[in-house]
């Protein structure tokens, strides 16, 4: 039997404690029959899927001003759920116009048919192969969601996503699609200098090498779904719906009025944006002030 000095024992304990911190967490496998969504959590040199409780109950019919976008994404998701050919999708456009809400609404509609969502942050795209391995044998269909995604040139996660979309060794298994939301159509910043270097070939203008590289990632998405700011009428429709929802939660009815309409328009001017997010934020402000005044 070896007798170690107390200071050696203490040093070994510190070493073991440090090593233990680097090891993956001991977690139970996700029960996808009851869990509809998960996040990838990085830990040390790897990570794990963490189940999340879905609290957003947005329904497709509540999303206004994006009828064509809903039609495209519902059809693509239905195809995917039935094992038919379907495309990875890039939902791009102005902020607050419903890109993320549409994906959440798809989950709420199709979870009962086996749809599940895994959200991954940009920095964790380097773990795509591990994420794919963890779900490829599951009897469910997974949307891998990268929300509000933008890149800078040369990032490793950019290259990993590009490889996954390109059908390389990192490509997604048959039961996984990739949906990405972004304010940028090509996911990368674009500069005036990118257009320098274009040339005519057989009478046709060819893009510069810089632009070719920037388009090369977004071009790998089978679907580009664009989202734009609302017209004023669409915006007011969204405000009316949001106010009704906020009031209904509290068991009251708030009548539509000219003052409410004018305040909603002024709110959109102050925010410099007519979109679903602006309508939602205004409704919370209006309903809150209305109920506070009623209680006074």
Image (cartoon, grey):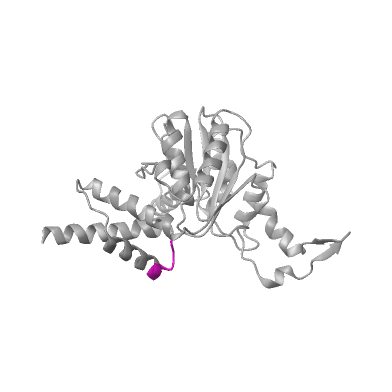
Which x, y percent locates residue 98?
Answer: 46, 52
Count of numbered labels shown in the rendering: 0
201 shown above or below 135: below
Bounds of the magenta span? 269-274
Left or right side of 186 for 14: left
Could you tell me if residue 241 is visible in this image?
yes
User: Image quarter for residue 52?
Assistant: top left
Residue at image coords 47%, 46%: 102
Residue closest to the far front:
258
Residue 227 x, y percent position in the rendering: 53, 54
Is any atom of residue 24 visible in this view? no
**Residue 121 locus on image (x, y percent):** 50, 52
User: Looking at the image, which residue is at 19% across and 45% down?
Assistant: 251
Q: Which quadrant, please, contains the C terminus? A: bottom left
Please tell me which residue lies in front, 25 or 186. 186
Q: Residue furthest left?
A: 296
Quarter containing the N terminus: top left
Name which residue lies at 23% across and 58% down. Answer: 288
Rendered view: 98 above or below 201: above
Q: Is residue 239 left or right of residue 287?
A: right
Above or below — where is 88 with respect to 188? Answer: above
């Amino acid at each position: 039997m070896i007798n170690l000095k107390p200071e050696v024992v203490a040093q070994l304990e510190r070493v073991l404690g440090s090593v233990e911190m680097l090891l993956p967490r001991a977690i139970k496998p996700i029960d996808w029959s009851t869990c509809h969504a998960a996040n990838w959590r990085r830990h040390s040199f790897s990570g794990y899927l963490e189940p999340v409780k879905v609290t957003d109950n947005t329904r497709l019919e509540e999303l206004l001003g994006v009828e064509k976008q809903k039609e495209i994404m519902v059809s693509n998701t239905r195809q995917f759920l039935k094992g038919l050919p379907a495309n990875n999708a890039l939902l791009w456009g102005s902020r607050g116009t419903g890109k993320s809400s549409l994906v959440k609404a798809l989950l709420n509609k199709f979870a009962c048919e086996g749809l599940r969502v895994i959200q991954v942050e940009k920095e964790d795209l380097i773990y795509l192969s591990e994420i794919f391995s963890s779900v490829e044998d599951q009897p469910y269909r997974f949307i891998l969601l990268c929300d509000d995604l933008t890149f800078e040139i040369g990032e490793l996660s950019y290259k990993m996503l590009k490889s996954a979309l390109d059908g390389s060794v990192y490509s997604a298994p048959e039961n996984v699609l990739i949906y990405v939301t972004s304010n940028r159509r090509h996911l990368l910043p674009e500069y005036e200098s990118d257009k320098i270097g274009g040339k005519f070939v057989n009478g046709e203008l060819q893009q510069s090498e810089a632009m070719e590289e920037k388009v090369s990632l977004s071009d790998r998405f089978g679907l580009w779904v664009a989202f734009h700011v609302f017209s004023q009428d669409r915006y007011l429709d969204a405000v009316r719906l949001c106010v009704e929802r906020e009031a209904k939660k509290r068991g009251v009815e708030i009548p539509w009025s000219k003052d409410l309409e004018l305040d909603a328009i002024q709110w959109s001017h102050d925010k410099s944006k007519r979109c679903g997010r602006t309508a939602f934020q205004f409704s919370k402000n209006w309903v809150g002030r209305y109920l506070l005044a009623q209680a006074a």
